[in-house]
Image (cartoon, grey):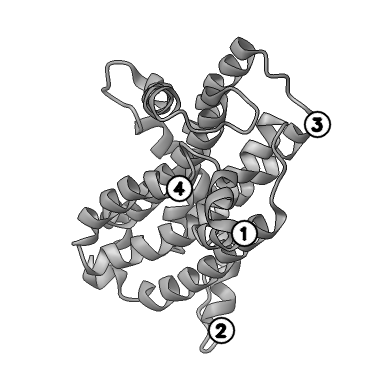
């Protein structure tokens, strides 16, 4: 039986060690959240496919059919799908993790465990939805005859980077949501606006054509931009990855994550009292 030893001045070192010690709790939380995700719904896990599918259909009809935006040499529906799936993963992970502490107030106020486990387990639930929604991509590639290339092997790494990109904003919002409940109204607004300021229905190469390379780099300050570009590079096979903007976007994600972890740890001591 393990003992929890509290030593003065060693709280930070023990905290990161406790993340590993409580790994079973992390698995239980992730499994619980996954099971109740679509509990008492009529179509269950089909929502993981239906939501991005409707977005792809609407985006393809409006931006591809009416606006006739360029698609970088691939069918427009495939390009939109390659941008929609990572965006839904990012937005779902952000929304779920941002509400994870408030939704588990009964646990936080009763027992000790690293609170960081709650938003991390919420991101796993978003990943399950993402994995299910990959069926849409496979069917579209089959329908349009888009053959996968060796680049598809980079998809697991890009998914891991998507985890990193979502965890930073998720940690910051969940910490702020405990102290300021106004953020439960801010988060849906951020997700809604983020859909249009992220290159989901258009490519970043179109931005470069109009605003130059500096315009593309400025767009890459959005953490999800590098992930979407990476997914399109891996899936479409015809588009080249703009490495400067990709690395810049990933760098922003890493810096944001470190900043969010620091803010989360500073506010964590008061969670049980405030929540």
Q: With 61 as the anchor, is 210 left or right in this view?
A: right
Disc 4 secondary structure class = loop
Kindly identify which numbered label has been placed on residue 10: 2
- The answer to whether the residue labelled 1 contacts the one labelled 4, judged by CB atoms less than 8 Å apart, is no
* Nearest to N terminus: mark 4 or mark 2: 2
Q: Residue furthest front?
A: 210
For the C terminus, the quadrant is bottom left
Extreme residue toward the right, this view:
150
Which residue has dot 4 on it?
198
Mark-to-mark CA distance, 1 and 3? 28 Å
Mark 1 vs mark 3, foreground winner is: 1
Please tell me whether residue 242 is drawn above or below residue 258 in the rendered image.
above
Which of pointers 3 and 2 lies earlier in the amino acid sequence?
2
Query: In what element is the residue under mark 1?
Result: helix
Front tag of 3 and 2: 3
Residue 79 rendering spot, x and y as whole percentages:
56, 30
Residue 220: x percent and y percent?
A: 55, 58
Q: Position of residue 247 (x, y in %)?
A: 67, 59
What is the CA distance from the residue labelled 3 to the residue labelled 2? 47 Å
Task: Compute the Cα span from label 1 to label 4.
Answer: 17 Å
Number of the front mark, 1 or 2: 1
Residue 73 appearing in the image: yes
Which of labels 4 and 2 is toward the front?
Answer: 4
Mark 3 and 2 residues: CB-CB less than 8 Å, in contact? no
Circle 1 residue: 213
Q: Kindly give the residue lying farthest to the bottom in the view shown.
A: 9
Q: Residue at x 63, y 63 (%)?
A: 248
Label 1 Cα neighbours within 10 Å, binned few <14 / some 14-19 / many ≥20: some
The disc placed on residue 150 is 3
Q: CA distance from mark 4 to mark 2?
A: 42 Å
Residue closest to the eye, 45 or 65: 65
Ranked by sequence position, the earlier of labels 1 and 2 is 2
């Amino acid at each position: 039986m393990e003992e929890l030893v509290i030593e003065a001045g060693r709280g930070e070192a023990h905290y990161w060690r406790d993340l590993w010690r409580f790994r079973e709790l992390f698995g239980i939380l992730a499994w619980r959240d996954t099971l109740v995700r679509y509990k008492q719904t009529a179509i269950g896990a089909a929502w993981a496919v239906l939501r991005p599918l409707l977005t792809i259909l609407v985006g393809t009809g409006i931006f591809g059919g009416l606006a006739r935006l360029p698609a970088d040499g691939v069918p427009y529906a495939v390009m939109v799908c390659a941008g929609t799936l990572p965006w839904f993963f990012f937005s779902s992970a952000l929304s779920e993790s941002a509400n994870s502490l408030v939704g588990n107030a009964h646990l936080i106020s009763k027992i000790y465990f690293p609170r960081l486990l709650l938003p991390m387990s919420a991101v796993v639930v978003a990943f399950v939805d993402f994995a299910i929604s990959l069926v849409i991509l496979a069917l579209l590639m089959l329908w349009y005859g888009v053959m996968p290339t060796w680049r598809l092997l980079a998809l697991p790494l890009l998914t891991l980077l998507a985890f990193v990109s979502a965890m930073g904003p998720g940690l910051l919002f969940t910490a702020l949501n405990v102290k300021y409940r106004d953020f439960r109204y801010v988060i849906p607004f951020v997700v809604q606006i983020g859909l249009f300021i992220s290159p989901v229905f258009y490519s970043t190469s179109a931005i470069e054509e109009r605003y130059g390379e500096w315009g593309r780099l400025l767009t890459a300050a959005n953490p999800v931009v590098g992930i979407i570009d990476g997914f399109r590079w891996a899936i479409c096979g015809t588009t080249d990855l703009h490495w400067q903007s990709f690395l810049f976007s990933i760098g922003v994600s890493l810096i944001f994550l470190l900043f969010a972890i620091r803010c989360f740890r500073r506010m964590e001591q008061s969670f049980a009292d405030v929540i």
